[in-house]
Image (tube, grey):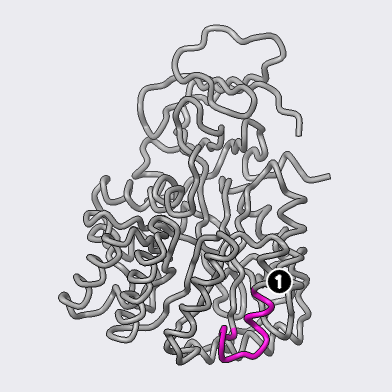
């Protein structure tokens, strides 16, 4: 995709002094004064707006949002398995088109400043790898205006659902980027067998790992430590994530402390949505211990929950409220779970507001980062790889 050089004047990176950003060949070339522009450069006056790095949704499910469908009453819960069974019935009835649903949600994310998405995509005997193929098609269609990582995700279980292991291999051959897993003890009832297969697939295909871990208290702590042990044994430090990790929200401080130590020593990242009704990791404690913690929207208007608008600033707000962050430094940490910390968690190497990084950023009308999290403002400009992709909440770079 051809890119035009870009000059964005009068912006305040993360609330700092006003400056200009010059973008060439999709990357940040200079940050500082810019009194003139080169011929052929597209110029934009930021009007003193706050400049933030592109937002990162480190955990969502693009293939199964109900966006664009009539309202679906929520009938899930209370157990995780109940949600899974309810989703299975609804997906069969609605016949969701994964490519269409992924595009609908991704475009909304882009308009709100998201430049990178990690999506867990279902692999199971009902859909086979059709959802993987659909999201792969959407990723290709939206290339250049958002980056999408795809996790092959065994939502119904990896061992307890015959045929899923073979479908996971097929998904990875098709182009899925990450090996997924789900509650090795609670769903598959075979933590050793589950983790043997997940790590074997990761080793065979040279892929990272991202495991949903909803298991609470001692059960979740057991599986968390097993994942950390496997991570060290396979030399996969920095390439494994545990999503949700509800056991880190246990009431037992000693149980939590042991898990935090295991994560830090193994270089295993965690993801939290800042959930209102479930146990949740303490973001500040994990960050202080050296654990990389990120955030994501998770399911959005789907069989699991009727909420969500694909806004990662709103998600940072939820993380801040769940963790009772009131001071500016806490609100800044909440944003970091959707920016710099998320970039580290999903393996981005050229991210950030610095010279040489990919030019992924957005402008918002706020005085400080803390204000942008506390009261998420409209997005006035979104830039992906040096290209303006949205203005005032509207996509301007539609795929052909």
Residue 379 drawn above or below residue 209: above
Magenta-colored stretch includes residue 165 = yes
Q: Secondary structure at mark 1?
A: helix
- Locate residue 38 relative to residue 242 in the image: left or right: right
Place of residue 151 in the rendered image (x, y in percent of width and height, measured from the top left): 59, 65
Place of residue 363 in the rendered image (x, y in percent of width and height, measured from the top left): 52, 35
Query: Which residue does the image show at 48% across and 21% down from the upper left?
Result: 10
Regarding residue 78, the answer to whether it shows in the image is no
- Label 1 crowd (10 A; few <14 / some 14-19 / many >=20): some
Query: Which residue does the image show at 40% across and 55% down from the upper left?
Result: 238
Q: Which residue is mark 1?
A: 170
Regarding residue 306, the answer to whether it shows in the image is yes
Judged from this view, the residue extending furthest toward the right is 400
Please give the range of residues in magenta.
156-168
Q: Main secondary structure of the magenta part?
A: loop
Q: Nearer the viewer, residue 198 or 322?
A: 198
- Locate residue 344 relative to residue 221 in the image: left or right: right
Place of residue 362 in the rendered image (x, y in percent of width and height, measured from the top left): 53, 38
Place of residue 114 in the rendered image (x, y in percent of width and height, measured from the top left): 56, 48
Residue 132 drawn above or below residue 360: below
Magenta-colored stretch includes residue 1 = no
Query: Which residue does the image show at 49% across and 82% down from the upper left?
Result: 194
Q: Nearer the viewer, residue 45 or 266?
A: 266
Q: Nearer the viewer, residue 382 or 283?
A: 283
**Number of numbered discs:** 1
Q: Nearer the viewer, residue 265 or 307?
A: 265
State the quadrant of the N terminus. top right
Query: Which residue does the image show at 33% across and 46% down from the upper left?
Result: 332
């Amino acid at each position: 995709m051809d890119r035009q050089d870009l000059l964005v004047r009068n912006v305040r990176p993360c609330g700092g002094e006003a400056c200009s950003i010059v973008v060439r060949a999709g990357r940040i070339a200079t940050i500082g004064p810019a009194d003139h522009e080169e011929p052929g450069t597209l110029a934009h006056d930021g009007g003193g707006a706050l400049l933030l790095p592109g937002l990162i949704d480190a955990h969502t499910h693009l293939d199964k949002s109900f966006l664009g469908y009539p309202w679906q009453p929520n009938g899930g819960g209370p157990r995780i398995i109940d949600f899974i069974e309810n989703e299975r019935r609804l997906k069969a009835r609605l016949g969701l088109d994964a490519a269409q649903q992924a595009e609908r949600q991704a475009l909304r994310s882009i308009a709100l400043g998201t430049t990178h998405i990690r999506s867990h995509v279902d692999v199971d005997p009902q859909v086979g790898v059709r959802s993987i193929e659909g999201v792969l098609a959407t990723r290709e269609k939206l290339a250049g205006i958002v980056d999408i990582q795809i996790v092959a995700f065994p939502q119904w279980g990896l061992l307890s659902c015959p045929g899923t292991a073979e479908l996971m291999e097929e998904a990875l051959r098709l182009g899925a980027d990450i090996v997924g897993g789900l509650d090795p003890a609670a769903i598959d009832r075979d933590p050793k067998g589950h983790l043997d297969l997940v790590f074997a697939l990761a080793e065979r295909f040279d892929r990272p790992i991202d495991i949903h871990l909803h298991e609470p208290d001692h059960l979740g702590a057991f599986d968390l430590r097993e994942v950390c042990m496997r991570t060290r044994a396979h030399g996969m430090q920095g390439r494994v994530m545990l999503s949700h990790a509800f056991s880190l929200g246990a009431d037992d401080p000693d149980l939590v402390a042991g898990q935090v130590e295991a994560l830090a020593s193994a270089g295993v990242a965690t993801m939290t949505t800042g959930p209102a009704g479930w146990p949740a990791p303490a973001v500040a404690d994990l960050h202080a211990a050296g654990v990389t913690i990120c955030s994501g929207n998770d399911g959005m208007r789907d069989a699991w929950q009727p909420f969500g608008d694909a806004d990662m600033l709103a998600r940072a707000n939820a993380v801040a409220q769940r963790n009772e962050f009131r001071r500016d430094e806490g609100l800044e940490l909440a944003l970091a779970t959707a920016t710099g910390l998320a970039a580290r968690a999903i393996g981005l190497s050229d991210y950030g507001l610095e010279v040489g990084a990919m030019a992924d950023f957005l402008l918002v009308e706020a005085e400080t980062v803390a204000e942008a999290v506390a009261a998420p403002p409209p997005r006035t400009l979104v830039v992906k790889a040096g290209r303006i992709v949205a203005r005032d909440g509207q996509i301007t770079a539609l795929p052909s």
